[in-house]
Amino acid sequence: MSEPRPVETFPTVETWAEAIAARLSETLGAAVRENGRALFAGPGGSTPAPVYRRLAATDLDWSKIAATLVDERYVPETSPESNARLIRDVLLQDKAAAARFIPLYTPEVTVDRAGIVAAKALADAGGRFDAVLLGMGEDGHICSMFPNSPTLKTLLTPTLKPTVLGVPHGRDGAAPTIERLSINLAYLMSAGRVILGLKGAVKRRIFEEQAQGDPRIQPIAALIAAGVPLEVLYTEAS
Ligand SMILES: O=C1O[C@H](COP(=O)(O)O)[C@@H](O)[C@H](O)[C@H]1O
């Protein structure tokens, strides 16, 4: 198993969010200069809003940048559960309003069909993320790679091509409670830069535990084993 970089600790949410936004904008700016375009993927949830606010205020040529999600609930953007809603309301504002959004959700199809549609849209946009921001749930899920999900093995298969898969809801009330869409491990392996933003001592402990875990069932361990260039930025503050 390859060694992960050490976790970097920040004293406040402000310094933590500032550091993540600075790294993402540096990488997206370089991709625009080199390739004339850049592709960013980020999470939903409660963690990334301060990062997105700072990123949105950054001077980049946002008209050349496309943004998407690392995962999505199979719900329309009108739902408070929608990750797209967070991206639109917080990231695609201010200077970043000029960026293009590529949703993972397609209405009125099955979640698997929506995955195929999203995979095609991402392939058309370059098929490789220049920069990715990840969050992690307190059950150790990243993207919608849930420990114990029947889709986990496929999502974590490193030899598959980068794609987007439908994730069924868990049985007997297990997570996820809503069908999901998720990018797979191959998308993270091919990304230019991958940052995991961790907030709170509980998540830090879970990260440390899961990083040592079985890569067949612990997404974080699978990323490390696959050599994803993971930068982990942590603040205890909330
Ligand atoms: O369900 C999700 O949760 C994770 C973590 O969310 P948080 O609220 O604990 O920050 C998030 O990374 C993922 O994108 C989202 O769909």
Image (tube, rainbow, N blue to C red):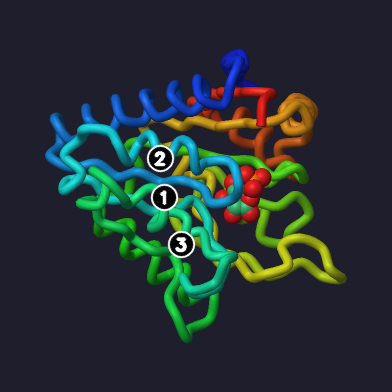
Q: Which amino acid does the dot numbered 3 rest on?
A: Arg
| Mark 2–mark 3 distance (CA, rounded to whole Å) | 14 Å
Mark 2 or mark 1, which has the lower sequence index?
2
Residue at left offset 42%, top offset 41%: 52
Mark 2 or mark 3, which has the lower sequence index?
2
**Can you tell which quarter of the image residue 87 is in?**
bottom left
- Quadrant in which the C terminus is drawn: top right
> Percent position (x, y) of residue 141?
68, 46
Quickly name the residue at label 1.
90
- Residue 95 position (above or below residue 114): above
Question: Badge 2, how many Cα within 10 Å: few under 14, some, many 20+?
Answer: many
Q: Which amino acid does the dot numbered 1 rest on?
A: Val
- Residue 78 position (above or below residue 193): below
Name the disc covering residue 53, or none.
2
Name the disc covering residue 85, or none.
3
Q: Label 3: state its secondary structure.
A: helix
